[in-house]
Amino acid sequence: MILLKSERLYFRPLGVEDVDLFVQLLRRNRDFWTIHEPKHPESFYTREVQLEKLAEAQAQLKLGKEYSWGIFLAHTNELIGSISIYSIRRLPFSSAYIGYSLDHAKTMQGYGTEAVAAALRFAFRDFGLHRMEALVSPRNTASIKVLQKVGMQQEGRLRQNLFINGVWEDHFLYSMIEDEF
């Protein structure tokens, strides 16, 4: 099990014992998160589907394709979000994507920036990746600020990249190279 820490947070893979807390987090943030993410069917917000997602994440971890963690407040152990390094590609690419979601009630407090910085530290220093990428909606100004604060650079715009709420939406591509971290 790979655990990460930062100043105010710790990160650990979610287990079966966390499913109910995670489902509560998903339900609480359903409207907030679906502004910039595809809508999910009602079944997505159930314990059963999230247990399947957890098993899928564990299988991806065993294959070396993804690392996923719950984001917890260090002083209260409260689950406030999730973060993943996914679509890991080894040489000749040695790259991956980073994705994250934070409880709406915990935004604008620096937790997103702290979490992304911790995951980048793991990706570059511990896991040995060369390049990290992130996709973000041009309308998601808070997430853009997080990526800029950690030093990721915008490389371009991917046209009609993701189907969100019935519309194909563009996304910015941000990246960071290991020497820039």
Image: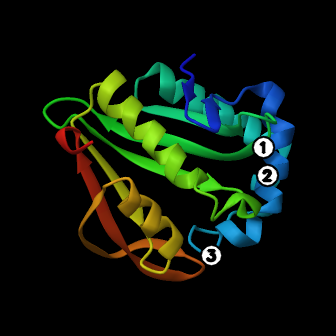
Q: Earlier in the sequence, mark 3 or mark 1?
A: 1
Residue 143 rendering spot, x and y as whole percentages: 49, 65
Can residue 127 be seen in this snapshot? no
Left-right relation of 111 to 129: right
Locate residue 47, reporting x and y percent. Answer: 84, 42
Quarter of the image where one finds residue 164: bottom right
In primary-sequence order, the first of circles 2 and 3 is 2
Give the residue displayed 70% in from the left and 38% down from the top.
Answer: 72
Residue at 17% across, 29% down: 91
Question: Badges 1 and 2: C-beta atoms under 8 Å apart?
Answer: yes
Residue at 35%, 22% (x, y): give it: 126
Q: Give the residue at mark 1.
A: 22
**Amino acid type of the residue tagged 2 in the rendering:** Leu
Q: What's the distance in space between the residues labelled 3 and 1, CA to CA?
A: 19 Å
Q: Distance between the Cα atoms at labels 1 and 2? A: 5 Å
Picture mark count: 3
Amino acid found under the numbered disc labelled 3? Ile
Q: CA distance from mark 2 to mark 3?
A: 16 Å
Front residue (pair 140, 117): 117
What is the crowding at mark 2: few (fewer than 14 residues within 10 Å), some, or many (at least 20)? some
The quarter of the picture where the C terminus appears is top left
Can residue 131 be seen at all in this image of the molecule? yes
Q: Dot 3 surroundings within 10 Å: few (below 14), some, or many (20 or more)?
A: some
Disc 3 target residue: 35
Residue beneath the point at 30% across and 32% down: 124
Mark 2: secondary structure: helix
Residue 178 in the figure: left or right of residue 41: left
Question: Height in image: 93 above or below 2?
Answer: below
Q: Amino acid at mark 1?
A: Phe
